[in-house]
Amino acid sequence: MGRDLAFRMFARAGAVLGLAAITSFGFAGQSGAAPADRPTDPVVLKGASLPTKLNVRPGKIVGFKWNGKWKQIPVQVDERHVVSARSLYPDIPVGYINGQVGVDEDIRSFDVEIYADPKTRSGADANANFDADDELVFLGGDAGSQAPGSAVAPQGVDASTATKVAVNDPAGGGSAYVYLFKASGNLDPSAGKDYVDYDFNLLNFEPGDTLIDDYGWTNTPNPEDSTVKTANYELHSIDRWREDELKITAGEAPGIDILDREGVSAGGLSSCGRSEFTFSANWKLDTDPGNDFNTDDEGTYVTVIDGPVRAIRSYMGANSGPYVEDVHLYYPDREDRRVNVRVHPIPQMYVWTDYSDAALGMTYRDQKNLTGVTIDGVPGQVNGQPGDDSIDLFDHEDFSDGTYAWQQVSGDKGTTTTLATAESSATPETFPAFKGFKGYYLDDSTPTDNAGERQCGGDLKAYGASGFGIDGVYPNTDPIFGIGAEPEKLSVNRIRYFGPPNQTAADADDYRARAQDPLASSASTVKVKAPTAKVYVFDKGKAPTARPGKVIRIKARAFNKGTGASGKVKVCVTGKDLAGKKCRTVGPLGAGKFKDVILKPKVKRNARGVLSGRKTFVTLTAATGDNVDGLGYFIPFKR
């Protein structure tokens, strides 16, 4: 090659400086199979459960899994804060927002913890960093194996902030792991993924209108054309409480709309005085003409978030319960819904799903009716009485101690499995007027206006209509009702899974086990080696022949063989017979990357060479920070 006696001239300085020892936990490469069997179930961690090293801006927290190498995964931080409930409405003292007694000058309030959203009256979190009440969420299927002791932190993160999250499956057993870091560069927490697409669209908004200043919070509907879409389902809403489309695309499901409406009722199933229509100030759209000129309503949006892992849709307002809160969390194959009830004593509160005629021929089943019945619009029997298809309804014991009860509609158009439970401070024993929780089912294409069959809108038919409610009267849950006693607590929790066609009771039981025992997690700090640059220099190409007074052409390569990106690299050539040092700067160089440069030093006019004038000695160096490498070798010399 024309060069000989080449050797490294410099020891590497700084190649091992600043490295933190890694602490190994358990067996390196331990399998994460168990939580991966629940790939779309969320793992939600409160900020209080994570190390303070991650008390940084939410956009700086990134997640990785280890499967032989690091792979970034999507994580999402949703900030929460405590605000005055009254601040969620304008300052105008109108209606029930000031308390059930309606005394304008007595503007009472209470505090609520809600999701922060600078686009709404909830507002931004006063603490802009990830704090104790904020939530970090990722999916169980994005967890991986435990990183081995030799693992070096990923590129673009602060290794000193490494946090290991162990994800445990209490239902199926086993563990998997996610590693959180503070990003030191421009890493995006989404990792380029978007599992849920939430398109929130208010039809009566003009350009420049905002939810803070222009939302119709009293005596007016707020029509929407809003969609939530994932790989497994699509939902459509036309106002706060009004969902009117459900298309399942999981597996081979065709994506046909099978929903008539999501129903809500208060005051009795034989009445339309309080429903999803009146809750949204759509008085004239229900079937009760007595509601047409009623103005008893307030409503406000709390949260509109479209994140990479989940979307959040949250609002308040249900007629004389302006602080009744409906929170929807949308994940890739499920919707988690929580209704926090804050209202005066009221009877017969129900939530249910009413399907359209597209669901005809599908099968309804639940945990007390495993075989199920065909949805055909023809009533049979309920609890042995005229009604629906010999269905035995849930009773209070089926929901005891936070137990989920399930209902399923399944067929060629896909499967919905709905799980429901409630958190309540009142019991039938302490409040006899409250008869407990119960199930609801109606399959009748020609329902009557009584006996719990009255239809308040939609197609005016009940196809496989199924849900959950309260029998009797639940006591006061409104903190500003105006009575001396502390309000009772009531929250209704519902999870809907959207699955492939023709799922079975066994699948529903599996979903219930997942809901009853969600993925658990624990976080701990872990020491991980920081990535470091190790830059080497090499000579490339044919060695030039040096001649006095002439310019020679030397090709050099700077090669980063380290685990981290380098800074800028200065590549130089020097030699006794050269007229000074010749340098070029390249980089930064990523791990495993190189850059070739051409150096053109001039040979001194009085150069004499060595080894009887046949050779001259040159030295190549590459330097970045504390990392310096050198290579010395002889090249031909002619006078």
Image (tube, grey):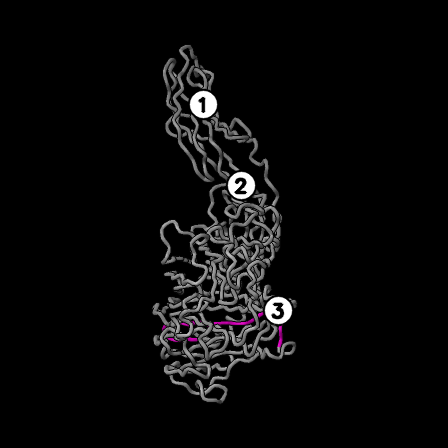
> Residue 386 in the image: x percent, y percent?
45, 89
Q: Inspect the image, locate mark 3, and give the three-letter code of the amino acid beneath it.
A: Glu
* Disc nearest the viewer among 3 and 1: 3
Residue 196 lies in what quarter of the image?
bottom left
- The residue lying at 40 percent from left, 83 percent from top is 448
Q: In this view, does 353 lie above or below 604?
A: below
- Does the magenta run of residues contain 457? no
What's under tag 2, amino acid-wise?
Pro
Would you say the residues marked 2 and 1 are in contact, meaning their CB atoms lie under 8 Å apart? no
Residue 101 left/right relative to 567: right
Residue 477: quadrant of the picture: bottom right
**107 left or right, relative to 411:** right
Marking on residue 405 = none
Q: Which of 317 and 555 is in front in this view?
A: 317
Query: Marks 2 and 1, how far apart in space?
Result: 28 Å
How many neighbours does mark 2 have within 10 angstroms: few (below 14), some (14-19), or many (20 or more)? Answer: many
Q: Based on the picture, tell me whether residue 411 belongs to the magenta stretch.
A: yes
Of helix, strand and loop, which mostly describes the magenta segment? strand
Residue at 38% x, 58% y is 202
Residue under label 2, please give it. Answer: 531
> Which residue is denoted by mark 1 in the rendering?
573
For the residues labelled 3 and 2, the Cα–Cα distance comes to: 55 Å
Distance from the alpha carbon under mark 3 to that under mark 1: 81 Å
Provide the residue span drawn in magenta. 409-427
Residue 488 is marked as 3
